Structures are given as structure tokens and as C-alpha cells.
Amino acid sequence: MPTKQVMHECKNCQRHTMHLEQKPNHILHLLMSVFTIGLWVIVWLMVSIGGSAPQCTVCGKKRGAFGLS
């Protein structure tokens, strides 16, 4: 999955730090959905909604679901 770099406030470090966030490859999921006659859409939705929480590059702590904590 492609990685995106974003600045967030880390609750553990108590400052703004660089966070790494993985984003799903939507083109790949679209092709998989076409080849599986739509069955892959379930997986695509789970990956897109659940996603990976941004992770601090200094302490390694993740922000939590939807970047809330």
C-alpha cells in the first residue's frame, strides 16, 4: 500500500510529529472487483473504512481509529 506522510499532534510525544499513514490502492481494488464480478467490493470497503491509523515516526504510537486518539 502507498504511504502518506502527514503532520499530527502525538499524544505520547506531546508535540507535532511526522506520522506515516497507509492508503489503499484503489485502482487495484477496482480491478479485483471487476475480475471477481463484484465480490471484492466487500474487501475494498473493509480496507477503505478500517484503514491503517497514522503512526508517529518518533515514538511509534498509532493515533487510533479514524485518527481520533
Image (spheres, helix red, strand yellow):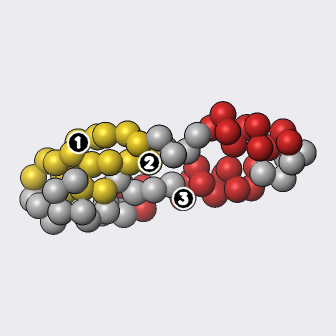
Sooner in the amino-acid sequence: mark 1 or mark 2: 1
Residue in the image at 9% along x and 52% along y: 15
Residue on which the image places disc 1: 7
| Image height of 8 relative to 59, above or below | above
Estimate the x, y position of residue 33 in percent, counting from the top left: 79, 43
Q: Position of residue 41 (x, y in %)?
A: 76, 49
Looking at marks 3 and 2 on the same chain, the residue that comes earlier in the sequence is marked by 2
Residue type, mark 1 in image = Met
Return the x and y of residue 19 as percentages of the image width and height.
Answer: 27, 48
The residue depicted at 54 percent of the width and 58 percent of the height is 50
In 3D space, how far apart are the residues under numbered discs 3 and 2 (Cα atoms)?
11 Å
Question: Amino acid type of disc 3?
Answer: Gly
Query: Which element is circle 1 on?
Result: strand
Per the image, label 3 sits on a secondary structure element best described as helix
Write down the quadrant of residue 43 in the picture: bottom right
Q: Is residue 8 left or right of residue 28?
A: left
Question: Real-space Cα distance between discs 1 and 3?
Answer: 20 Å
Q: Amino acid at mark 2?
A: Gln
Q: For the residues marked 1 and 2, what is the alpha-carbon distance in whole angstroms? A: 14 Å
Secondary structure beneath label 2: strand
Q: Residues within 10 Å of mark 3 (few under 14, many from 20)?
A: few
Pick out the residue farthest to the left: 14
Q: Which residue is labeled 3 in the image?
A: 50
Residue that badge 2 annotates: 22
Q: Residue at x 84, y 39 (%)?
A: 34
